Image: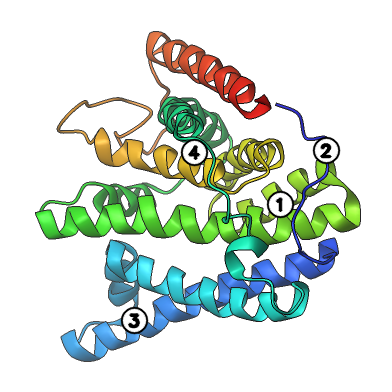
Amino acid sequence: MGFSGIVNAPVGPIGALRALGMTLLVVLATQGLQLLVAGSFMAVRGSDLTEAVARVAEHPLSLATAQLLGFVVILRWALRAFVPPGVPPRMAFALDEPPALGVLGIAILAGLALQLPLAEIGNAIREVAPTPLDQQLRVQRALEPRTLGAGLGAIFAFVVVAPLTEEVFFRGLLLPGLAARHGAGPAVVLSALLFALLHFGWAAAGVAFVAGLLLGAVRVRAGSLWPSIALHASINAVPLLLPRAVWSLPGFNEPSAAATHLPPLVLFGALGFALVSLLLLERALRR
């Protein structure tokens, strides 16, 4: 799936340094809102700030609210700064022409298959840059809700809000703006690097960079943002669909202080399925 081509979108040119500044603003906005929620929790519960921040980080609805508000603030400003007046947001972010349902279905299948190979990339990075166990456990608790309400909150946060906001910002706004200045190929790489900045920790950032390359390539080939959103959402859905209670899988949903790896049969099976799905997606996008 190549990076060449022209990204047709009514977004004005955005330089790499400006795109970096916009990404840092998003990070500051989302993290600031999380701290605000944590401060409110601290005031109500009488806990210290460290405990309050940890509790907020494990609560999907708190994360979703902070991310949604943070991205909306930056995107509203970006619409005025980089999109001609009168262009509706759906057109500006390539959301006005949904592709065929078959394309979205293949994108979803590809995302389901890609989660495990992406997880293995994170495992390889942890060999040289370990992720603290307490951080892994916080992520695990957020991805393994124990009540129906928490489960619905996790779906909303990780399968709806995160893919939609991140794709609109990185592949709907920054990628076309960077492409107008630097060309489609460099724009895919730059937007993937900026996407990695949103994810804290070397392993998470490395996984996000590789995923960003794939999502950017799909955006360029599709001419629409919807396949990238579908791909992103299905990648995020897999940890919710496969908790430890369903399938205990080392290297995927079993936190460990030392780096662990997926069983080879599982890894190569998922990788083969992912490659076939991506080839089918490429073929479908050519039609």
Q: Of callouts 3 and 4, which one flags the residue occurring earlier in the amino acid sequence?
A: 3
User: Which residue is tagged 4?
Assistant: 231
**Percent of width and height locating residue 136:** 36, 47
Point out the frontmost of discs 2 and 3. 2
As drawn, the residue found furthest toward the bottom would be 43
Q: Quadrant location of the N terminus?
A: top right
Q: Which of the pair 7/266 is nearer the observer? A: 7
Looking at the image, residue 139 lies above or below residue 30: above
- What label does residue 134 carry, if any? none
User: Which residue is tagged 1?
Assistant: 191
> Residue at point 63% right, 20% down?
283
User: Which residue is tagged 2?
Assistant: 5
**Percent of width and height locating residue 189:** 76, 44
- What label does residue 37 carry, if any? 3
In this picture, residue 240 sits left or right of residue 197: left
Q: Quadrant of residue 6?
A: top right
